[in-house]
Amino acid sequence: MADQLFARLFTMSRVYEPKLLDRWLGRLEADPILAPTHAQIGVRRNPYDPVDVRTSVQQYKPIELSRTKAPRYRIHCKQDAWTLSKLFLDLDGPLREAHFEAWWSALNDIASLFQLDYGFVHVDWRTRDTKETPEFSEGLGMDISDLRGCGPGNIFARTWYSPFLVNLIGSDQLPKLGHVKTDSGVTIVDLVEGPPWKATFEDLEAARAKACLTLSSIGLRVDFSKYPRLKPSAWRMDPSWDIKHDKTT
């Protein structure tokens, strides 16, 4: 079984808007496995206080949430002034099945709340030789500028695509990427059926490599071996990612 989990969620939704902030924070707070123990807003890192976090959020400043007991994690969230906002999760293994189940459910709930433009969940093994199989986690370190400039470029255990990205990929190509379903208007592609943390590395990597052949054939695969990375031939950024937010809360 895998023992690490990472998530990268990108959205044009205003993740600090009070109602939305309350809903996604509340989703974590309600589960003893997910509840953060500490929060950092600006330079302050304090024991987690639900009221303090909600009242101290500074527009366009990052929030760092962490948990110092199992399952340990770090969340980095930032609302941007003019483009995509983000929520990144790193779960520090080793993880038990209950940890995977709790986070899998929570991330899907948060993804629905955020109405994702793009996002993914990646599972991994601490014992994996990353030098032998670097392609498996290529793109895990992407940030907003990478997504805007080059597009997703890889595919993970679960990937969310907005309608714009689905149109760019082509609905007829989606089944070649994996197992497809929709939720709240966003398309979900899973590399394997069933919980990905129960799959073997070999099965996930084989499915990922096959999906990447399709991305290459349609001009959307990023060559992560080159830096700076070159924009794939078919990549076009969603024009809505350049719409400046109203800066009022």
Image (tube, rainbow, N blue to C red):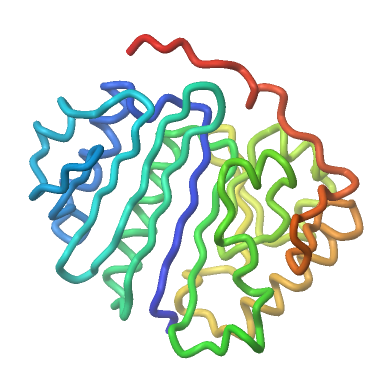
Drawn side of residue 152 relative to residue 185, left or right: right
| Left or right relative to 98: residue 156 | right
Q: Where is residue 83? Give x, y as percent.
A: 56, 27
Please say if 6 is above or below 46.
Answer: below
Q: Where residue 85 sits: x, y (%)?
A: 48, 34
The residue nearer to you, when weighing 207 against 50, is 50
Q: Residue at x 65, y 44 (%)?
A: 147
Which quadrant of the rendered structure holds the N terminus? Answer: bottom left
Where's the C terminus, which quadrant?
A: top left
Which residue is depicted at the point 82% across and 42% down?
Answer: 235
| Location of residue 63 by image quarter | top left
The spot of residue 247 in percent (x, y) is 41, 12
- Count numbered badges in the picture: 0
Question: Which of the 4 image quarters holds residue 95?
Answer: bottom left
Depicted 192 relative to depicted 29: above or below: below
- Expressed as whole percent of the image width and height from the top left, the position of residue 88 reads 42, 51
* Residue beneath the point at 36% across and 9% down: 248
Q: Nearer the viewer, residue 101 or 208?
A: 208
Q: Residue at x 41, y 31 (%)?
A: 79
Q: Nearer the viewer, residue 20 or 85?
A: 85
